[in-house]
């Protein structure tokens, strides 16, 4: 009897010691936000980033452990903890061998856009669960899960399969849109957000000498490449918070917000430009605006923020060369041409390349079959042609990845983590450090190097021990940490570890 009573008391004490669960998890991803943007502009941050840096648990050495470091892959990692080898999100675009077509990470021909015209998008290519899915599955679907961004993939992949809604900006209509995957028709509050044409106020407005076009088509495109795109995302997130009454019930809700303008600005102007600095400072102010809205609606101390980025970016090669650093450009067309020329010469006429994106080359399997060739041999021939190009550091083939081949170092490990054996490319190439695969843009990202993979990770809220943490961690550690805090199952593909050093209990 006494023992039983003691046990009851002990359980009660344990329960009492556990911090109360947050009413809301606010997951913020800034698209293309290198870790060094936190420290380089630190003295100029007075808003949300300053709040995160001064009150949060700040990881100074967080990074991605996969290649390619691009938007879809980063966004699919943050709340799943999975690598592309498991999640199946291997790139922004790839060649789907089952469908025989070029697909995007979220393209779904069975869906329609809501609020715009054309085909919609869905999380159907994501093979694993997200934190939102686990929250939903643990409580009979009652927690609310919403994703917001300018980009479809950045709204859909963090929020997951069971999300109530994902919303993104449509440059054709200037509306925030969703897809029939989530709804039969656009929720009324989204219609009400779109109706007063929130893009109109930016017509003709300039920032750092860049004037927004007057015509709709130009305006909707250029808004994305300016801090104004992030303003729209923030305003929409506030509206979602209010309309969906997030964080006001007995369950933990999830709102994922991805700010995309930093990426568009970074690609056009480069990480050392005044434009990138200005956009980072504007992001700091917008985050504070969003935090204040959540403070008001959910209550300070009742919500948990996790902040990160989906990838970094390389310096503009010409900027690097001018400061005596290495760097240069590899024309993606030259890679494709090298493979095509080599295979025609060796095996005969035909279309040999099905597609090439970022660091990936997909062979045309029909041509390989028509000539009755061994795929592994053709891949090796193509790899040799790419390796012969200047400033190619490494080349990997799918057959080699299947056999577990590779130099045993961190680059090969990142390539292996990024390689899904059904969806991965026939050849993956790694350029020399500071060399980018891209011709039409100032700079880009994708490689395993630190400028592309070193990103901020900050937690702030109940149950979190604030401070600076210098131990290297992976972005994949976010999801198991949240699962531990929220007392839910770890997402199905997670390879991360719970960051126990930041947990108060
Ligand atoms: Zn990008």
Image (spheres, helix red, strand yellow):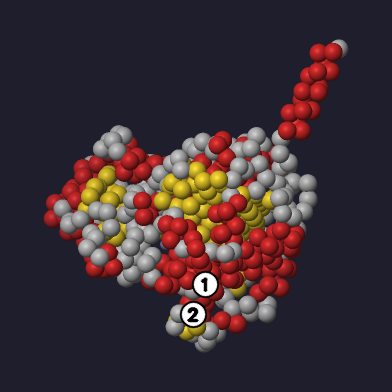
Discs 1, 2 touching: Cβ within 8 Å: yes
Q: Is residue 408 left or right of residue 56?
A: left
Q: Dot 2: few (<14), some (14–19), or many (≥20) neighbours within 10 Å?
A: few
Q: Position of residue 296 (x, y in %)?
A: 74, 61
What residue did someone put label 1 on? 227
The CA span between labels 1 and 2 is: 8 Å
Q: Residue at x 56, y 43 (%)?
A: 479
Whether residue 209 is situated above or below residue 190 in the rendered picture = below
Q: From this viewpoint, is residue 201 visible?
A: yes
Q: Is residue 397 left or right of residue 183?
A: left
What residue did someone put label 2 on? 207
Q: Report the number of discs.
A: 2
Q: From this viewpoint, is residue 365 visible?
A: no
Q: Residue at x 85, y 13 (%)?
A: 2
Which quadrant of the figure contains the N terminus?
top right
Q: Position of residue 147 (x, y in %)?
A: 61, 57
Q: Residue at x 61, y 42 (%)?
A: 465
Q: Position of residue 44 (x, y in %)?
A: 51, 66
- In primary-sequence order, the first of circles 1 and 2 is 2
Whether residue 452 is situated above or below residue 87 in the rendered picture = below
Q: Quarter containing ligand 1?
A: bottom left
């Amino acid at each position: 009897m006494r023992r039983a009573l003691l046990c009851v008391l002990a359980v009660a004490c344990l329960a009492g010691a556990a911090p109360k669960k947050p009413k809301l998890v606010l997951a913020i991803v800034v698209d293309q936000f290198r870790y060094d943007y936190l420290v380089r502009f630190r003295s100029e941050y007075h808003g949300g980033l300053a709040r995160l840096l001064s009150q949060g648990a700040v990881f100074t050495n967080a990074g991605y452990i996969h290649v390619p470091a691009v938007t879809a892959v980063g966004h699919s990692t943050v709340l799943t903890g999975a690598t592309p080898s498991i999640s199946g999100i291997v790139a922004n675009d790839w060649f789907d061998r089952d469908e025989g077509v070029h697909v995007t990470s979220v393209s779904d021909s069975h869906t329609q856009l809501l609020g715009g015209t054309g085909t919609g998008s869905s999380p159907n290519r994501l093979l694993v669960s997200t934190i939102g899915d686990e929250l939903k599955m643990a409580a009979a679907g009652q927690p609310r899960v919403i994703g917001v961004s300018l980009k479809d993939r950045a709204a859909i992949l963090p929020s997951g399969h069971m999300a109530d809604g994902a919303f993104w900006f449509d440059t054709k209509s200037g509306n925030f849109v969703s897809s029939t995957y989530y709804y039969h028709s656009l929720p009324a509050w989204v219609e009400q957000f779109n109706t007063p044409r929130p893009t109109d106020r930016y017509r003709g407005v300039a920032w750092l000498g860049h004037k927004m076009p007057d015509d709709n088509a130009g305006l909707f495109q250029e808004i994305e490449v300016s801090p104004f795109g992030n303003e729209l995302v923030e305003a929409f997130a506030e509206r979602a918070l209010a309309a969906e009454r997030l964080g006001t019930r007995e369950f933990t809700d999830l709102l994922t917000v991805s700010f995309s303008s930093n990426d568009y600005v970074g690609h056009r102007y480069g990480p050392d430009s005044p434009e990138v600095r200005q956009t980072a400072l504007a992001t700091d102010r917008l985050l504070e605006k969003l935090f204040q809205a959540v403070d008001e609606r959910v209550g300070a101390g009742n919500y948990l923020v996790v902040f990160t980025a989906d990838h970094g970016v390389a310096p503009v090669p010409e900027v690097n060369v001018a400061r005596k650093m290495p760097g240069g450009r590899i024309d993606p067309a030259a890679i494709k041409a090298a493979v095509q020329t080599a295979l025609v010469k060796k095996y005969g006429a035909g279309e040999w390349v099905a597609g090439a994106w970022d660091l990936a080359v997909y062979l045309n399997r029909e041509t390989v079959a028509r000539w009755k060739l061994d795929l592994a041999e053709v891949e090796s021939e193509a790899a040799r042609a790419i390796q012969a190009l200047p400033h190619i550091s490494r080349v990997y083939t799918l057959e080699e990845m299947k056999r577990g081949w590779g130099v045993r170092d961190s680059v090969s490990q990142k390539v292996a983590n990024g390689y899904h054996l059904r969806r991965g490319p026939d050849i993956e190439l790694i350029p020399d450090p500071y060399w980018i695969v891209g011709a039409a843009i100032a700079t880009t990202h994708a490689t395993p190097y630190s400028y592309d993979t070193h990103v901020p990770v900050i937690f702030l809220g109940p149950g979190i021990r604030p401070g600076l943490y210098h131990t290297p961690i992976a972005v994949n550690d976010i999801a198991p940490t949240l699962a531990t805090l929220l007392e839910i199952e770890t997402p199905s593909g997670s390879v991360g570890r719970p960051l126990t050093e930041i947990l108060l209990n």
